[in-house]
Amino acid sequence: MKRAVLLLLSHGLVLAIGFAAGIYTLPLLIAPPAPDAQAVAQASQGASHVAQFRRDLKGSDALHFGEGRISVGPSAVVFDGRLAPGPDYKLYLSPRFVETEAEFQQHKSAMLRVGDVKTFNNFIVELPAGVDLQAFNTVVVWCETFNEFISAAQYRE
């Protein structure tokens, strides 16, 4: 009986670890190719604002972070850097800087959901026509599936 319980626990633990590893690695396996440095440089040329994603934000941790340069222009948001991999990332523009899940949830109704982030090393997300960048000051990457804050960068005061 004791052996059966130990086997059940050990197999359950291995199953849980495998499931967690699958959730973490699946987005990497199905992600499209990231834009190369030349495409990122070209897309960021018309940017009116530049900011940095940093790992040291309150809501970021070892599994949820972004680090690199974000460029915001009239037609696209361009990222040159690295995001922690995960599923269902969305890019938002926010009228105020947020750096935690609670702050994001509190102000989400005032934010503009721009589009999907499908790559984790560099991305280019087109802005919808007519977006007033002056109505916002922060770019936020958010995981919709797990309601997780990934990163944010304030591009203007």
Image (tube, helix red, strand yellow):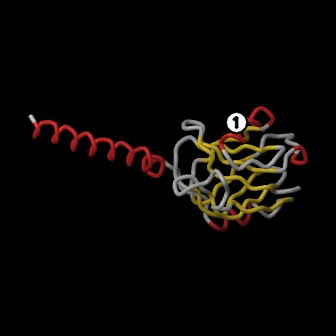
The relative height of residue 15 versus residue 151 in the rendered view (above or below) is above
The relative height of residue 49 versus residue 118 in the rendered view (above or below) is below
- Secondary structure category for the residue under label 1: helix
Q: Nearer the viewer, residue 6 or 54?
A: 6
Which residue is at a point 73% across and 59% down the rendered structure image?
70
Q: Nearer the viewer, residue 6 or 121?
A: 6
Pick out the residue farthest to the top. 109
Q: Residue 124: image x %, image y %?
A: 68, 53
Amino acid type at circle 1 is Gln
Which residue is at a point 56% across and 52% down the rendered structure image?
64
Pick out the residue farthest to the front. 2
The residue tagged 1 is 105
The relative height of residue 8 versus residue 124 in the rendered view (above or below) is above
Q: Residue 26: image x %, image y %?
A: 43, 46
Q: Quadrant of the N terminus?
A: top left
78 lies left or right of 117: right
Q: Quadrant of the C terminus?
A: bottom right
